[in-house]
Image (cartoon, grey):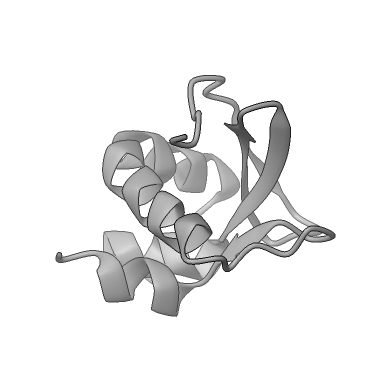
Amino acid sequence: MPLDFSNGRAHYDAVKDGVVIDIKDGARNVPCVIEKQALADFEGVSSVSPGTLVSIYRSHSVRINKVISLVYSAGHFDAKHGLRITSNILNGQRRR
């Protein structure tokens, strides 16, 4: 079953230092954080505000969600902490 990103909620969380998105795998909630640095590197900028991070995610959500789905399918999911998308993960898959 593919992950469901349709809720569309994305917000910056300073404690988690990234953009938090709501994902569902059937009835299961899958917490996901895309690190601030991952999004900045993805966009090719060195400094970004929280609002800009959310905008980067939204404007590239189709590509980013594909990476998240691949990571989840590969089993890189921690039941306690969910998914954490780092720059290495996001930008290593970016150009495929």
Q: What is the quadrant of the C terminus in the image?
A: bottom left
Please identify the residue farthest to the left as the structure is shown. Answer: 96
Q: How many marks?
A: 0
* Residue 60 quadrant: top left
Q: Nearer the viewer, residue 35 or 84?
A: 84
Please identify the residue farthest to the front as the structure is shown. Answer: 1
Location of residue 91 in the rendering, given as x and y in whole percent from the top left corner: 32, 71
Location of residue 30 in the rendering, given as x and y in whole percent from the top left corner: 68, 43
Q: Nearer the viewer, residue 35 or 14?
A: 35
Is 60 left, or right, of 49 in this rendering? Answer: left
Instruction: Kindly identify the residue that appears in the image at 50 percent across and 70 percent down.
Output: 37
* Residue 18 quadrant: bottom right
* Residue 20 quadrant: top right
Is 82 left, or right, of 64 in this rendering? Answer: right
Instruction: Kindly identify the residue that appears in the image at 48 percent across and 48 percent down.
Output: 53
Instruction: Kindly identify the residue that appears in the image at 58 percent across and 68 percent down.
Output: 76
Q: Nearer the viewer, residue 63 or 14?
A: 63
Please say if 86 is above or below 58.
Answer: below
Location of residue 77 in the rendering, given as x and y in whole percent from the top left corner: 64, 62
Q: Is residue 45 visible?
A: no
Instruction: Kindly identify the residue that appears in the image at 39 percent across and 34 percent down.
Output: 58
Q: Is residue 27 visible?
A: yes
Location of residue 28 in the rendering, given as x and y in whole percent from the top left corner: 72, 34
